Image (cartoon, helix red, strand yellow):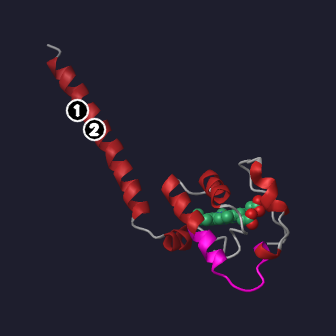
Amino acid sequence: MTSLRELGRALAALGIIAVLTGTAANAQNLDQGKSAAKLFADGCTTCHRSPRGLAKGRFKLTLYLFLKDHYASSADTASALASYLGSVDSNQRGPSRAAAKPSRSATGTSHSSLRPPMPVQGR
Ligand code: HEC
């Protein structure tokens, strides 16, 4: 008597599982196919014209937490972007603001907070 109902429930459950796994796989594939440079070009250049100067000599972990908190949907993309921003900045030779700065920001970071160290003026 209840077999039809049970069948319906089983089908519904299967449908839900299919939807969940399907979207999860899609989301992962979307991110995985992209390099950090592509991620930046796709998601960040609307507001940041260049990846340079965003890392500002920050620790990768600080940057990672910031990105994960504010932008990147997955830990993987946040990590990739953090590395990318850091590498783009450290490759830059010449009078870099991060290098020229006194170590005030570097020594003060042990009390880790999730907020970015300071809002930046005049962007
Ligand atoms: C909708 C516009 C917008 C987009 C898109 C955007 N950002 Fe931002 N981002 C901002 C603004 C505005 C700030 C300044 C926030 C502040 O200074 O407090 C900021 C700050 C930052 C900072 C901190 C820099 C600093 O000077 O302290 C980093 C790092 C950063 N963004 C990286 C990214 C990355 C990586 C992406 C792409 C995943 C991205 N942003 C996409 C608007 C955007």
In the foreground, 106 or 21? 106
Instruction: Report which quarter residue 56 is drawn in.
Output: bottom right
Residue at point 81%, 65% (across, down)? 120
- State which region is magenta: 84-98
Task: Tell me the quadrant of the picture where the N terminus can be found.
Answer: top left
Q: Which residue does the numbered mark 2 point to in the structure image?
A: 15
Contact flag, marks 1 and 2 (Cβ < 8 Å): yes
Q: Is residue 45 visible in the rendered structure shown here? A: no
Query: What's the residue at 73%, 48% (across, down)?
Result: 112
Badge 2 amino acid: Gly
Q: Which residue is at 78% across, 57% downward?
A: 117
For label 1, the residue is: 11
Q: Which of 77 and 87 is in front in this view?
A: 87
**Residue 15 seen in render:** yes
In terms of image quadrants, where is residue 52?
bottom right
Q: In which quarter of the image is residue 28?
A: bottom left
Q: Mark 1, residues whose alpha carbon is within 10 Å: few (<14), some, or many (≥20)?
A: few
Dot 2: what SS? helix
Q: Give yes or no for residue 97 being in the magenta stretch.
A: yes
Q: Where is residue 58 in the image (x, y as percent from the top left)?
A: 71, 63
- Given the current orientation, which residue lies at the most extreme top position? 1
Question: Residue 47 appears at what percent x and percent y?
Answer: 66, 70
Q: Does the residue labelled 2 lie within 8 Å of ligand 1?
A: no
Closer-to-camera residue (3/90): 90
Q: Which mark is residue 1?
A: none
Q: In this view, does 28 lie above or below 91?
A: above
Residue 108 % position (x, y) = 81, 54
Dot 1: element: helix
Rendered view: 12 above or below 98: above
Residue 36 is one of the magenta-drawn residues: no
